[in-house]
Image (tube, rainbow, N blue to C red):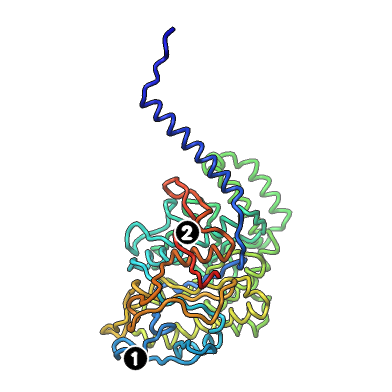
Amino acid sequence: MTRQAFPRRRFLAASAVGALSLFWSDWRRAQAIQPAGRAKARSVILIFNCGAPSHIDLFDMKPDAPDNIRGQFHPVATNVPGIRFSELMPHLARHADKLAIVRSLQHRQTQHNTGMYWSIVGRPYRIDSTLINPSRSDYPSFGTLVGWLAQRDGYASALPPYVITPSPHCDSSAYITPGQYGSCLGARFDPLVLNADPNAPGFRVANIGLTEGVTAARMQERRGLLERMDGIGRVRYGADFDVNQNKAFTLASAAEVQRAFDLSDEPAQVRERYGRHSWGQSHLLARRLIERGVRFVTTVNGPSITWDTHENNFVRLQTSLAPRMEQAYAALLEDLADRGLLDETLVVWMGDFGRTPLINRTAGRDHWPQCYTMVLAGGGVRGGQLIGESDAHGAYPKSSPLSPADIHASVFTLLGYDPHGIHYLSPEGRPFPLSEGQAIRELVS
């Protein structure tokens, strides 16, 4: 009796395939039973300041530094002894007891789009450049991942779980920051991006609500016709086709979606409190969406890289940037607290990076990712605390150097998700954790 040959190479290959199959099935089974942690937060509002605000002129002032570093503004007392903010932020100074100020954040990406990518994705982009755009080979932002997790956990609202207002992170409309869309997770996890100014007269989000002359019955007739014709679309666009079509019809016809975006429903006094400008009304809209169950809302303080103060840093901060930012920010904190929503809503304030301690020849500050500040409030975070410390010039961390990845790990932990125990498939097709960072003890304990 002859024995059939089984070459060593074929044996090793078969063994590898079998091991991989076992690993994959075990991993999928583990994902399905992954227990949620003790969530402190239910949702997130990200206030993102495109262009990078100056940490030294806002939350980490250096009054004892030389003139060419400390700048023109003076620190003022807050409602927490020992914590001082810039004189540009009198409203926020009354809310320091709600804020956890992280003053030792750092990364190495010096350009706006890659700095924004690092900040919202929690890992560096493969090159350091502004001249980049989104693709399906990107890692997803934490907004994208929170939307993905919400849908995985049964999110069923007509409102999308992840919304960006008023416009996406970008360095001009030609170069949109990667990571903020569905990325490697697919188009079904793209956020709803308004691309509209909530402060504009007659503000209306495109494709939400029925167009004039189209009744609900007529819309259903059109949908029925499409369903009979859509075989070609399913073949061409694959599994996302039905998902995206259903999403489009829901946004167009659901009354609750239309009401959520109807800012005319708010009293004039409330709208004035937030500020009758794009930033203020975007923050108000974020509150309305969170109130209705949306899991992650990004309000982009733009347009584009508005905070890029290479020239006239002090004039621009004083006249246009800080007043609008802090009015809207303070109003949001007050409104969430008054409505009993702050305890379950994590509010994250951040930018691409910081700005140089040394003032340049045009009275500006340049890009500086080596050390900068971000701020968190609500969602179970203990306020009235400073986390980390920068050196005497605000140039480098003096203690507790942290990365955006650590912020991401903290956000997921506060939402009740294990940042290292839950995985998605990376652009390379391998299981990848929600975050590679470490949750910051002072934020999550």
Q: Position of residue 129 (x, y in %)?
A: 32, 63
Amino acid type of disc 1?
Asp
Does residue 208 appear in this view? yes
Of residues 308 and 43, the one drawn nearer to the viewer in this rendering: 43
Amino acid type of disc 2?
Ser
- Secondary structure state at the residue bearing disc 1: loop
Q: Which residue is mark 1?
A: 64
- 327 over 133 or under it: above or below: below
The disc placed on residue 435 is: 2
User: For the point 65% across and 74% down, which residue is it?
Assistant: 341
- 421 over 312 or under it: above or below: above
Q: Position of residue 95 (x, y in %)?
A: 56, 85
Does residue 170 appear in this view? no
Crowding around mark 2 (Cα neighbors within 10 Å: few <14, some 14 to 19, many 20+) is many
Task: Say whether residue 395 is left or right of residue 241.
Answer: left
- 66 over 409 or under it: above or below: below
Of residues 19 and 85, the one drawn nearer to the viewer in this rendering: 19
User: For the point 63% across and 77% down, which residue is it?
Assistant: 336
